[in-house]
């Protein structure tokens, strides 16, 4: 009997022990230790009201309420989970209920972070969930990254309204995360190099001519070796830290010899004869002629770099991959240095060198920049070393990013320096540059003063003339072309850290100074109806507010109309290129050519194989005129949509210069956790002409006028109606 009892006891202990070892997460909001606080381990993102609701739950006692009031922007309640699991897909399932959600969306959020940056993200924004809904189950699934550090799951509400969340469940490949066996993360060789984890230990502010020259050569050599040397590609050496090791030698007059010894320490490698694709497949060749220029570098260094150029490389590299199917660059394993010291010259130089070489070897539009990219490197090395604080560092990087002239390229995500620089508050007024003047085109709902009206021209802001404001700040507005820079200037010119802003305005009554009250900065969302009928015979579609799949319902109602207006002066909320074109064409047509980079030959860009076509056999295709409206708000997917839809019979593009930035974006994280994008693939018309910077060229050019705005007219839309009726 004793033996039976002992066995039973051991069995019970083992069961209890295994239960204790299983992680317990508070995903149902039930554990709540402190009064008036969030549930245990949940964290707040945003400034909106978050509270436990014990009167409105699906299961258990509690749900989580987010209440976003007018002017607050967004609210989010998040939970951090470990990412030490294996799998391919991660799914968040949860119940949501929402009430009077407008000017945004409600959703579940999943984010995967590595080294302080997001490597996987979805917040259901594309589903455009708005209005009011009772409790329903929703899910969101993204690719799981096995080398990640953290997983965040959250409920989010953007705009205004109320939303409740309850009973979250997280699974990886269908298995509950609580039941998965954690895996121990094995450190790579690079991660085991910890010498410079606290900083580069290199500081300098004033550079002499020898140091400037040596840093310029170092920047080019460091990047070339990073992407061309097989040992670096294997991830066996921390190339950031190797930069820090060689920086103290930049005062040497025989610096090139130091570089030869430095590179030789990497070890030997096999060489091969490099073969390029056929000439008609090549869009852009690498900029590597400099490695043979013995007027620039020593003959010994030149010989070694040419050998590296002929290295037998694989298509795998520790620092760069190409996204499957699209082939835009995926910059991997780049350290963020989110706690960097802004006196650390080594990390500041790393930032310049990293970005410059990413552009040099993997930006498909580098040939379209106005400035010589080498000259930019020369200019920014002393400019960056002279910066003294976070503000100087951030603004210098923003200026550098602007040099590539890509509207996708900016400093994205929240940045404290830029928020303070442009201002935490904003006058609730929409500006637009019309006839090269800053014009009030809308008074937002938050506008409470009576001293401005639509059509007023802004001449000065806080006593600074508009043209002088632009002269001082235009370099901080990266864009592919000038009209798009003006678009972005108009969004920030009325920002300030004060509670009011003084404006000098001009209207039909003359010139006067007015003071306008400001509110805490927020993005003013515009939510026009997704479609309507104009004058009974014209269908109108606004893709910016389409719900997923709604285009099919709309076109079934519009097929008998005389004309169709597609207003692409927005960013489409749904990808409608193929679904809509099937209604407009009775045949397949080419509409685009794409280029992509190459890991084995960095800097080489070739035309992607395979035709990309729209349309199909449809004898009942739309027979009327199609007018596509574009302007500087037409960017990326909107430009791609315009390219596809304009090949329809009787289609015309109407409007003005678009943003000139198309193609899938690639994210770049720079030291200080500064995040930016580039256009990651080249997008050209079927005849090979550029769209980057050029944009979509209208068939009929028309722009708003100041008189038209004062009269309340949409002159571009009116012209579209006229073209259909005539």
Image (cartoon, grey):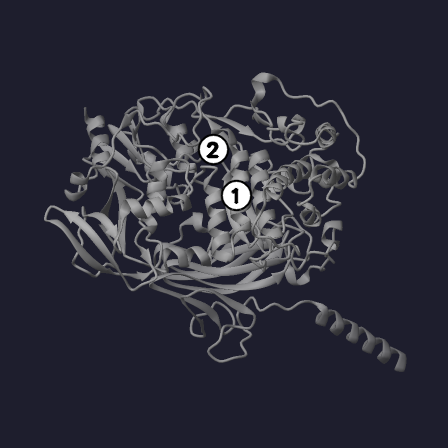
Q: How far across and how far down the image is residue 709, in percent?
A: 19, 42
Q: Residue at x 74, y 53 (%)?
A: 193
Viewer can see residue 275:
yes
Q: Residue at x 67, y 67 (%)?
A: 23
Separation of residues labelled 1 and 2 (CA atoms) = 13 Å
Q: How far across and how far down the image is residue 269, in percent?
A: 79, 33
- Against 200, is 647 above or below? above
- Against 504, is 584 above or below? above
Please give the residue where the numbered disc 1 appears in the rendered image.
380
Q: Quadrant of the N terminus?
A: bottom right
Kindly check if marks 1 and 2 are in contact, taking CB atoms under 8 A apart as contact: no
Compared across the picture, whether 451 is left or right of 145 comes to: left
- Callout 2 secondary element: loop
Q: How far across and how far down the image is residue 225, in percent?
A: 69, 37
- Against 356, is 564 above or below? above
Which one is earlier in the sequence, the residue at label 1 or at label 2?
2
Compared across the picture, whether 178 is left or right of 311 comes to: left
Give the camera-side residue of 662 and 647: 662
Q: How far across and how far down the image is residue 117, in percent?
A: 57, 53
Name, please, the residue furthest toward the left: 509
Give the camera-side residue of 692 and 43: 692
Q: Residue at x 33, y 58 (%)?
A: 496
Give the camera-side residue of 559 and 273: 273
Please give the residue where the numbered disc 2 appears in the rendered image.
371
């Amino acid at each position: 009997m004793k033996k039976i009892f002992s066995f039973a006891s051991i069995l019970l202990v083992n069961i209890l022990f295994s239960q204790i070892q299983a992680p317990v997460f508070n995903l149902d909001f039930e554990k709540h230790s402190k009064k008036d606080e969030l549930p245990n381990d949940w964290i707040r993102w945003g400034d909106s009201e978050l509270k436990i609701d014990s009167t409105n739950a699906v299961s258990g006692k509690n749900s989580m309420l987010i209440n976003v009031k007018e002017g607050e922007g967004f609210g989010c309640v998040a939970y951090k989970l470990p990412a030490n699991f294996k799998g391919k897909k991660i799914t968040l399932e949860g119940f949501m209920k929402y009430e009077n959600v407008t000017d945004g969306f409600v959703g579940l959020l999943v984010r995967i972070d590595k080294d302080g940056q997001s490597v996987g993200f979805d917040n259901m924004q594309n589903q455009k969930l708005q209005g009011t809904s009772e409790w329903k189950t929703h899910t969101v699934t993204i690719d799981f990254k096995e080398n990640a550090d953290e997983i965040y799951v959250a409920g989010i509400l953007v705009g205004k309204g109320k939303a409740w969340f309850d009973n979250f469940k997280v699974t990886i490949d269908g298995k509950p995360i609580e039941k998965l066996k954690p895996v121990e993360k094995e450190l790579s060789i690079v991660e085991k190099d910890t010498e410079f984890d606290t900083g580069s230990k290199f500081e300098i502010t004033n550079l002499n001519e020898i140091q400037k020259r040596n840093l310029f050569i170092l920047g080019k050599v460091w990047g070339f070796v990073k992407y061309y040397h097989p040992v670096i590609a294997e991830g066996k050496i921390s190339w950031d830290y190797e930069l820090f090791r060689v920086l103290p030698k930049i005062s040497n007059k025989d610096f090139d010899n130091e570089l030869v010894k430095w590179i030789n320490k990497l070890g030997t490698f096999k060489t091969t004869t490099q073969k390029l694709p056929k000439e008609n497949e090549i869009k852009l060749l690498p900029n590597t002629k400099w490695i043979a220029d013995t007027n620039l570098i020593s003959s010994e260094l030149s010989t070694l770099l040419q050998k590296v150029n002929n290295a037998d490389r694989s298509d795998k590299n520790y620092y760069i991959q190409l996204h499957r199917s699209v082939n835009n660059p995926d910059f991997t394993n780049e350290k963020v240095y989110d706690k960097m010291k802004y006196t650390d010259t080594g990390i500041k130089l790393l930032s310049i060198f990293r970005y410059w070489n990413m552009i040099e070897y993997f930006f498909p539009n580098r040939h379209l920049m106005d400035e010589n990219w080498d000259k930019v490197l020369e200019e920014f090395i002393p400019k960056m070393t002279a910066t003294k604080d976070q503000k100087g560092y951030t603004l210098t990087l923003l200026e550098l990013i602007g040099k590539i002239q890509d509207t996708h390229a900016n400093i994205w995500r929240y940045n404290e320096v830029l928020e303070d620089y442009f201002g935490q508050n904003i006058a609730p007024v929409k500006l637009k540059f019309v006839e090269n003047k800053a014009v009030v085109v809308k008074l937002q709902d938050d506008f409470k003063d009576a001293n401005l009206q639509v059509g007023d021209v802004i001449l000065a802001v806080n006593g600074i003339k508009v043209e002088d404001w632009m002269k001082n700040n235009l370099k901080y507005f990266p864009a592919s072309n000038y009209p798009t820079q003006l678009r972005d200037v108009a969004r920030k010119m009325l920002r300030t850290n004060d509670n009011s802003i003084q404006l000098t305005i001009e209207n039909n009554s003359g010139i006067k100074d007015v003071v306008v009250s400001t509110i805490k900065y927020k993005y003013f969302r515009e939510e026009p109806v997704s479609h309507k009928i104009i004058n009974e015979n014209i269908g109108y579609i606004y893709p910016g507010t389409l719900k997923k799949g709604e285009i099919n319902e709309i076109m079934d109602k519009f097929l008998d109309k005389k004309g169709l207006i597609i207003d692409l002066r927005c960013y489409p909320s749904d990808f409608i290129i193929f679904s809509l074109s099937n209604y407009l064409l009775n045949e397949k047509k080419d509409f685009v050519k794409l280029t992509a980079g190459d890991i084995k030959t960095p800097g080489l860009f070739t035309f992607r194989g395979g035709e990309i076509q729209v349309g199909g056999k449809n004898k009942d295709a739309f027979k009327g005129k199609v007018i596509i409206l574009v302007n500087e708000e037409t960017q990326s997917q909107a430009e791609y949509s315009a390219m596809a839809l304009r090949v329809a019979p009787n289609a015309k593009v109407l409007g003005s210069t678009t943003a000139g930035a198309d193609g899938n974006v690639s994210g770049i994280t720079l030291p200080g956790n500064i995040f930016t994008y580039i256009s990651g693939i080249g997008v050209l018309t079927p005849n090979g002409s550029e769209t980057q910077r050029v944009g979509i060229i209208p068939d009929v050019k028309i722009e708003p006028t100041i008189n038209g705005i004062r009269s309340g007219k949409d002159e571009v839309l009116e012209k579209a109606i006229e073209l259909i009726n005539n």
